Image (spheres, grey):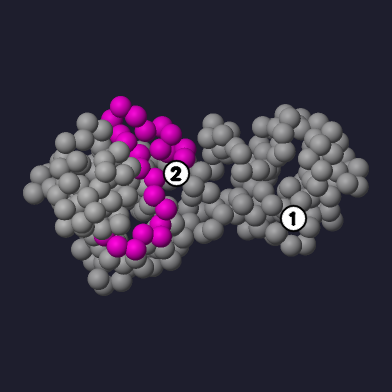
Amino acid sequence: MKEAILNHYGFSRLPFGKDIAVKEVFPTASASEAASMLELGLETEDIMVLTGPIGCGKSLVLRAATGRFDTNAYQVIYLRGAIGTPAELLKLILQGMKIDPPYSATKAKPVFYDAVAEAKRKPVVVIDDAQDTATEALLALKTMTNFDGDSANRITFILAGQPELATTLQFAHFEALRARIRLSYALAAMSLEETIAYIDHGLAIVQYTGSLFSDNAKIEIFHRTGGIARAVNSLCYRAILAGAIEQKQVIDAADIPLEVG
């Protein structure tokens, strides 16, 4: 089926897939602002928060932003959000710094503080899907950014997650942690204009120069997806697949699948 699509439309590779390079990411206004926030906060912020609905492009923003961090100054440690305890978090960070963590949680804590204080490159810990991180592990972030009253910013945490992460952090027991969060950003879905440009961009990066989707089809895709990038990718790909099977040269609104995916 892949070859049928490539042969029919002349794409250099399948469009609207996951294998997109950072330099090929479509720069929506919201994503660009979010990435800029993360870059600007690197030097001074203890904890930054990035939220957005499923499929809006949080992971791409993280890739784009961290890909521009100075590797001589910063060491990015990428973690998934299902972290159950403070001890587990400490050990994962130490492993990310290429340090064998002690088995004992009590011993891991001083090793962590010494390692961060002595690090030649500042650790930047990205916790993706942070809404799945246990309350105790999130609360531990406050003490993990304290270095005996040292005013210097030794480590930065970037919490990325679905909108419920922002809701969770509003609970009363997170008040002290919230005081450490000065920069946060909620990613927005694409506008109609951005969705149209996103579709055009997705075709341009696979070397397609024609007008495959009609204007009405692009508008229909926006209304079906609400401008959520992952949903746009799904609808566009499924429409292209059907178009190749039916030997269509132009995909119109009536050709857009009823279900997003």
Residue plotted at (72% across, 38% down): 14
- Residue wearing tag 1: 220
Q: Is the residue 199 above or below the residue 181 in the image?
A: above
Residue that extends furthest to the bottom in the rendered view of this protein? 172
Query: Badge 1: few (under 14), some or many (20 or more) residues near its Cα, within 10 Å?
Result: some
- Residue wearing tag 2: 62
Give the residues drawn in magenta, as a range.
Answer: 62-86
- Callout 2: SS: helix
> Would residue 77 be counted in the magenta stretch?
yes
Q: Position of residue 72 (x, y in %)?
A: 30, 27
What kind of residue is marked 1? Glu
> Would residue 70 be counted in the magenta stretch?
yes
Left or right of 91 on screen, residue 148:
left
Q: Is the residue 19 above or below the residue 144 in the image?
A: above
Q: Give the quarter of the figure containing the C terminus.
A: bottom right
Left or right of 258 on screen, residue 234:
left
Q: Are marks 1 and 2 in contact (CB under 8 Å)?
A: no
Which residue occupies the foreground of this view, 66 or 51? Answer: 66
Can residue 91 be seen by looking at this rendering? yes
Structural distance between the alpha carbons of marks 1 and 2: 29 Å
Q: Position of residue 249 (x, y in %)?
A: 87, 40
- Callout 1: SS: helix
Residue plotted at (88% across, 46% down): 245
Residue that extends furthest to the right in the rendered view of this protein? 247
Q: Earlier in the sequence, mark 1 or mark 2?
A: 2
Q: Position of residue 201 (x, y in %)?
A: 66, 37
Residue that extends furthest to the front in the rendered view of this protein? 103
Q: Is the residue 133 above or below the residue 208 in the image?
A: below
Residue plotted at (21% across, 35% down): 119
What kind of residue is marked 2? Leu
Which residue occupies the foreground of this view, 90 or 54? Answer: 90
